[in-house]
Amino acid sequence: MAPVKISYVVSFSSQDPKYPAENLLSEDGIQPWLGCPKDRRRQLSVELQLERASPIGYVDIGNHGCAFLQIEVGRSSWPRDQPYLTLVPTVTLMTPADSKLDQNRCGVRMFKESDFSELTVGQKWDRVRLTCSQPFSPCSRFGLSFIRLRTPQEQEPDPPRPPLDAVVPNSFVPTVRLTLSIPRRSREEEQLRSCLWKLEGAAWSPAHLSRSAQMVLLAARNQALRPRAGTSALEDHLELPAEGEGGPAEPGSALDVPAAPPSTCRQ
């Protein structure tokens, strides 16, 4: 959100010699721009030249007795008869009641891109025209205290993504290796496991099968893995439990599979 500097005043419809339009170039905003006391028109306009063509993201306006305000933008390269584009449609700065009572004259209005006309967003402009009016109080002096322009907020770039062939940390290698090495169980393996459960009625999970039954199951798995590459990675992770029934398998080992319900094991 860099500030957009105003270089000079291109033109104005009216000004008070004590409060000229050049006061809008001041950054302190102490002295306002007011219309000429002898001018009975209730509308003022001023055209400002920006230091360089820039996109406009924010506009801050200091009011000094105006009831309505409109902001337009253009380019110095345009022909004189080409109309400017509306940046901010006419907005209310003072209510009719406040205008007649001459109160709440010096408010501040801040506009952002969502308040701008679609055609002007994202484009670069080097001319700004302000048109203000006060139709409710025919005797009061009015004008603007200041105008501040800023560019849109820059979006932060997305963080770079790691390449697909990035090295995987050591702590994740065993898990990825095991997950990628184990194939889907074949229908024959499921049928074999079902037969082993029927033969050993006391066993209700693969961890409680006898060592002989587990050797048969392992041989069937190796047979299913033989056509695929990487069988050595799987065999390195498969460990048989100690001799005898009832030996629990290590948590997370290749033989630690979810237990089947007792009703499906005993028939």
Image (cartoon, rainbow, N blue to C red):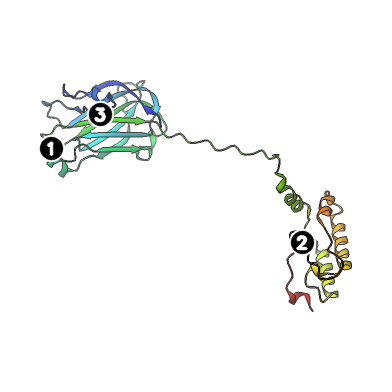
Q: Nearer the viewer, residue 133 or 107?
A: 107
For image coordinates 21% across by 36% down, the residue present is: 106
Using the image, tell me which numbered label, if any, was put on residue 250: 2
SS for callout 1: loop
Query: Dot 1, crowdedness within 10 Å: few (<14), some or many (≥20)?
Result: some
Quadrant location of the N terminus in the rendered image: top left
Q: Residue furthest bottom?
A: 267
First reached walking from the N terminus: tag 3 or tag 2: 3
Quadrant location of the C terminus in the rendered image: bottom right
Using the image, tell me which numbered label, if any, was put on residue 29: 3
| Residue 214 quadrant | bottom right
Q: Position of residue 116 (x, y in %)?
A: 35, 37
The amino acid beneath tag 3 is: Gly
Q: Nearer the viewer, residue 83 or 221?
A: 221
Q: Left of 143 or right of it: where is 229?
A: right
Front: mark 3 or 2: 2
Q: Left of 192 or right of it: where is 123?
A: left
Whether residues under marks 1 and 2 lie with C-beta atoms below 8 angstroms apart, the answer is no
Front: mark 3 or 1: 3
First reached walking from the N terminus: tag 1 or tag 2: 1
Whether residues under marks 3 and 2 lie with C-beta atoms below 8 angstroms apart, the answer is no
Whether residues under marks 3 and 1 lie with C-beta atoms below 8 angstroms apart, the answer is no
For image coordinates 14% across by 25% down, the residue present is: 36
The amino acid beneath tag 2 is: Glu
**Mark 1 lies on residue:** 137
For image coordinates 19% across by 37% down, the residue present is: 105
